[in-house]
């Protein structure tokens, strides 16, 4: 009875096996884009279908699931994906990062260091960083095969010449395992160092582009940088979260309305679970 409920309503076992086969290849070739037969799901492409298929292919009845969007457990995307997965698998849910075995995310990596028994699934809107310099898919594939990333280095150099810095806010390109150029998804630069030599397994799914790639545990992930213009994360000295007082997490600003109707901007931690845990400490 549980088995019927576990596979009810979304992708069948053959589809799950297709995803798992692609994941095995992706883990064996860190950073390499692996094609897979992306299925139609009851959500629009571009809203997390790739990540959702990975989660549904891997999750087991004993797993505990956490879904976040830009660090927030209660955003529209996170709430709806969490509800969909829970109703079709029956797995337990949590908002606490440390309690989760599978975390599906869009645009953030949790502030807490993930453990070896945790899997982070990232939703991917654009799979290939070479799209910035080579829109032709076939030529970009050849460039990956030959590790020919000269045009990306030129793109980075032009960014420095024009702006005086590596003006790439999200989707910062990295070299994985000294071999493949990889898109980090729209995570902020703050999260990029968390991919390097991590304990957890990172899985990336692009449903619209039908590609899967991975960063296995303890893998080298190096952001592109120049000797005289190093990679830097976002940081404003002295800025702190208005709720928990943290000054060493990724902070975001949002508008709130006072009782008298006035609007003001408040800076808080992007990771709501991390922020709530800090507030709970006496």
Image: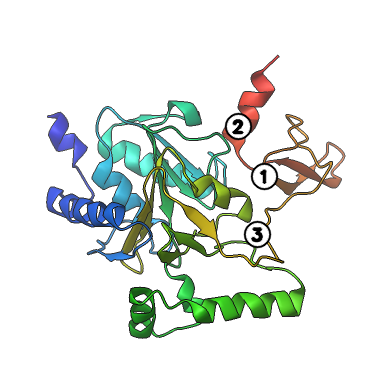
Q: Which residue is mark 2?
A: 274
- Quadrant of the rendered image containing residue 240: top right
- Quadrant of the rendered image containing residue 66: top left
Q: Which mark is residue 250?
A: 1
* Image height of 149 relative to 70, above or below: below
Q: Regarding mark 3 in the picture, which secondary structure is present there?
A: loop
Q: Which residue is mark 3?
A: 231
Give the side of residue 159 with respect to residue 184, left or right. right
Q: Regarding mark 1 in the picture, which secondary structure is present there?
A: loop
Where does residue 167 sit, x and y in percent of width and height?
68, 68
Give the side of residue 58 with respect to residue 275, left or right. left
Of the residues under marks 1 and 2, which one precedes in the sequence? 1
Give the side of residue 82 with respect to residue 174, left or right. left
- Quadrant of the rendered image containing residue 124: bottom left
Where does residue 214 sit, x and y in percent of width and height?
36, 54
Where does residue 271 sit, x and y in percent of width and height?
60, 39
Residue ID at (65%, 59%):
231
Of the residues under marks 1 and 3, which one precedes in the sequence? 3
Colour treatment of the image: rainbow
Where does residue 38 sit, x and y in percent of width and height?
26, 63
Between 21 and 28, the residue placed more toward the observer is 28
Between 74 and 64, the residue placed more toward the observer is 64
């Amino acid at each position: 009875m549980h088995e019927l409920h576990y596979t009810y309503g979304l992708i069948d076992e053959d589809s799950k096996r297709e995803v798992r086969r692609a994941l095995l290849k992706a883990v064996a070739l860190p950073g390499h884009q692996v094609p897979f037969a992306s299925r139609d799901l009851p959500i629009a492409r571009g809203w997390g279908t790739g990540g959702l298929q990975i989660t549904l292919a891997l999750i087991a009845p004993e797993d505990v699931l956490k879904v976040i969007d830009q660090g927030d457990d209660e955003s529209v995307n996170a709430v709806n994906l969490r509800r969909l997965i829970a109703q079709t698998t029956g797995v337990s849910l949590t908002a606490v990062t440390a309690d989760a075995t599978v975390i599906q995310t869009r645009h953030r990596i949790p502030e807490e260091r993930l453990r070896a028994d945790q899997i982070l699934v990232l939703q991917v809107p654009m799979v290939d960083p070479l799209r910035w310099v080579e829109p032709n898919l076939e030529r970009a594939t050849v460039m990956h095969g030959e590790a020919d990333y000269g045009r990306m280095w030129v793109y980075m150099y032009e960014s420095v010449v024009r702006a005086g810095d590596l003006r790439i806010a999200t989707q910062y390109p990295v070299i994985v395992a000294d071999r493949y150029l990889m898109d980090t998804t729209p995570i902020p630069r703050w999260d990029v160092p968390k991919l390097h030599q991590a304990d957890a397994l990172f899985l990336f799914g692009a449903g619209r582009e039908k590609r899967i790639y991975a960063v296995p545990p303890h893998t080298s992930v190096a952001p592109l940088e120049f000797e005289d213009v190093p990679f830097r994360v976002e940081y404003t000295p002295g800025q702190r979260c208005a709720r928990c007082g943290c000054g060493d997490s990724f902070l975001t600003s949002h508008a709130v309305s006072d009782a008298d109707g006035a609007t003001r901007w408040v800076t808080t931690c992007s990771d709501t679970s991390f922020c709530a845990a800090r507030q709970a400490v006496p």
